[in-house]
Image: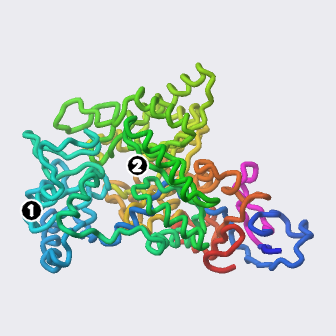
Amino acid sequence: MAGMVLTNARVYTRAEADPQPVLGALVIEEDSIAFVGDVDAWRNVDGLPVHDLGGRTVLPGFIDSHTHPSMVTQSNWHVRLPWTTDVEEILRFIRAYAKAHPPEEAPFLYFEYYPTATFTGSQPTKELLDSAISDRPCLCQDFSEHEHWVNSRMLELMGVTRETPDPVPGLEMFVRDEDGEPTGLLREMVHQHFMAELYDKIGWTPPEELTPERVGKFFHFLTEHGVTALLEALIEDDEIVASVAELDRRGELNMYYEGAVRFRAMDDLPDAIERVKRLQAEHGSAHVHVNTLKLFLDGTNESGNSAVLAPMCHHTEKGQLGEIGMDTSQLADCLQVSNAAGVDVHIHLVGDRAFRVACDAVEQVQERLRATGEQWTTQVTMAHCELIDPADRGRPATLGIIVNWTTHWSGGYFGEGSKEHLGAERWNRMYRFNEIARSGAMVTFSSDVVTSYELHRAKPLFGMQIAHTRIDPEYPLDPTSYPGSVRPDASARLSRELLLQGYTLNGARQLRLSDRMGSLEVGKLANLSVLAEDPFLVDAEQLGSISIDAVVFEGNVVHGSL
């Protein structure tokens, strides 16, 4: 019989009735857990190898319930900008890089990132970027990841003019001057609609193939850090699902994969649902699954286009409440169609108005179905939820909505970028999830990494450290303004108990895997990590540095050793 016995262990099962560690043994038979408890109570260990863990800690495998393997893989050719808000320094770097890499070598230049605060009180323009590079298309990505700065040559090659309609006005759009001319500032991923034309004109495409070998590096990294399941929050290219399925066939995936297909409105929802069903039929397996839709409901707080209840501060248009992709009734209609199709919905939203609209839409569709006797089965997850009106904090629990948060954003990662739009009072009450959890709602956690630039921040323990301390060790807030670089409000720090719950059992529930994983209980799959130290006992600032000595997936050691 395949399996093993882990003895002398501190096992955090994360079972609902078992919050404290079990001191003793964990027995694995085949791919599942057969016993957790005092080793003397287990009599049937003959033939199984025994590993003495020397008091080390055992946790359930982590679940990253919102991340982007495709985007990280496809970003490997991007060029990293110096981290500065000095526009002239950024332009000098671009100018020097372009001179060292002529068009025949680099026909399109993609730079990341410039800090969001670089253009506080102003906006970047194509003319400004033209002053550094005009002989080929160039794109610079804002640190918020939701704005892009391009030069005139790129707009020209994309065929974008004043007559070009915005794909999603207010969200996926070209910022324009008073005459309607694109200024060179792009919102969201609007350029993706035009890149095929640009690449055709320059006769070149970037090295963005989503092959098993290229994609496998992302999954291997997460495996090393204890992740045994994830949600890819945006499938742009079907090739990713095919490659993940191939990794699974080779025995190299070592985790569960759920994918989400984007829709923008009711018009494209049927096609998105058909795509979900096709990808599942073509590539679905025990480990690979596609049954989720993704919607961007609003923009970002840093860009000033999140949907808010009270007017933005310092905005050119008085009374501006940001942008939202759908109203309550439209979103409720989409949710009703999704429910009839048996698919789940994952919604990007950051502003308090977007949060309220989403809650209202879920409530509305549930009332409709109750009136007709139909069953509500769609699972709605609201990702980010950065600003929530206190009056709405109890609604996810009442409505059965899951709230997903990106832990490594909890400190100073985005600096004060959104303060100019939201003002100090709202900025100080962003990122509050203790009240949501205390109300009884399910909170899950994730990395939401979108580029190789930040892949190292996908480590769950690193995210836990930042969410627990509200201090970003890489991007600390100015300690002269924020004592200890702690992001206000300090009371919003998340407990280690909640963080572990959100990264394990709650994450499994979001991915509909809790019958198989998320806790270390008899009958569940043996997906776990062995840590050199106990995350409940180390100093808070050491959480992210804990070594993961071994990772076990379905009873097999897939990283490190015991």
Q: Indicate the secondary structure of the residue bearing disc 2.
A: loop
Residue identifier under label 2:
488
Q: Give the label on residue 502, or none.
A: none
The answer to whether 441 appears left or right of 160 in the picture is: right
Of 152 and 484, the residue lying toward us: 152
Q: Residue 130, labelled with which disc?
A: 1
- Residue 386 makes an appearance in the image: no
Which of the 4 image quadrants contains residue 208? bottom left
Tell me if mark 2 has few (under 14), some (14-19) or many (20+) residues whose alpha carbon lies within 10 angstroms of its own: many
Mark 1 or mark 2, earlier in chain: 1
Q: Which residues are magenta?
A: 7-27
Residue at position x 12%, y 65% from top? 88
Q: Nearer the viewer, residue 549 or 544?
A: 549
Question: Contact, CB < 8 Å: mark 1 with mark 2?
Answer: no
Quarter location, residue 209:
bottom left
Residue 521, given in percent of the width and then of the height, sits at 76, 57
| Mark 1: amino acid | Asp
Q: Residue at x 45, y 43 (%)?
A: 347
Q: Position of residue 207 (x, y in %)?
A: 32, 72
Q: Nearer the viewer, mark 1 or mark 2?
A: 1
- Residue 110 covered by magenta stretch: no
